[in-house]
Amino acid sequence: ASQSLHPWLIPAYKNTTITLEGEVTLTEDLHVNKGDTLIIKPNTIIYLGTGVSIISYGKIIANGTATMPITFIPLINNNPWGAIVLQGEGADGSILRHCILDGGSGTRYDLVTYTGMVSTYNAKMIIDWCIFRNNEIADDAFNAKYTRVEITNSEFNTIFSDAIDLDISEGII
C-alpha cells in the first residue's frame, strides 16, 4: 500500500536574504530564487569569474553611495564575466545605485539569451548613479525586455555595441 502525504505536512519554503559585502569572489553563477532578496552592501567589490553571472528571479538591492560604490569586475583581466540578470515579476523593485559595472558580457540561462551586461526581462527596476563600461561579446551594456526601467544620473563608457537597448519596454532615461 502506498502512503500519501498531506500538503500541510510539507514544510513551506521560507524566503531568504543573501547579503554580499566586502570583497566577494564568484566562480560560479549565483542564483536568487523568486521571493528571495540579494542585498549588496556599499563598498562591496564583486570579482566574477569568466562567464559567471548573477541570475535573479528575486529582488536585487545594490545600494552603494557616492563615496562607497559597489563594483562588479572580472576576476581575471580581459576575461569578461557574464551578466546580472533580473527575470520576472519576483525581481520587480530591484535597484542598482552607485554601482560600477565593468567588463561584463551577457549569458544564456534556461533557454533565454540575455544580451546585456545587465539584463532585466519582465522585471521593473531602477538604475541610478551607475557607471557601465568595457562590456564585451554580448551586444548591450543594458538590455530590457517587456518591462519598465528608470535610468538616471548614469554613464556608459567604452561600450561594445548598444549602451541601452529597450525592447518592447518603456522607461525614464
Image: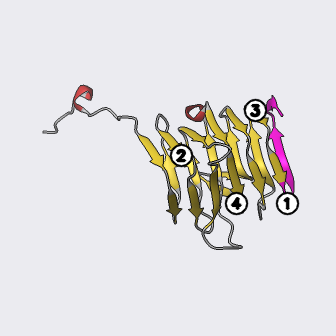
Q: Nearer the viewer, residue 78 or 11?
A: 78
Q: Amino acid at mark 4?
A: Gly
> Residue at label 4?
104
Residues at marks 3 and 2 touching, judged by CB atoms closer than 8 Å:
no
How far is mark 1 from mark 4, CA to CA?
12 Å
Residues at marks 2 and 4 touching, judged by CB atoms closer than 8 Å:
no
How far is mark 3 from mark 1, CA to CA?
21 Å
> Residue at label 2?
40
Disc 4 element: loop
Is tag 1's residue or tag 4's residue first in the polypeptide sequence? 4
Q: Position of residue 116 (x, y in %)?
A: 74, 52
Relative to 109, is 76 above or below?
Answer: below
> Residue at label 3?
150
Q: Position of residue 133 (x, y in %)?
A: 78, 57
- What's the magenta region? 157-173
Is tag 2's residue or tag 4's residue first in the polypeptide sequence? 2
> Residue at label 1?
158
How far is mark 2 from mark 4, CA to CA?
18 Å
Q: Amino acid at mark 1?
A: Thr
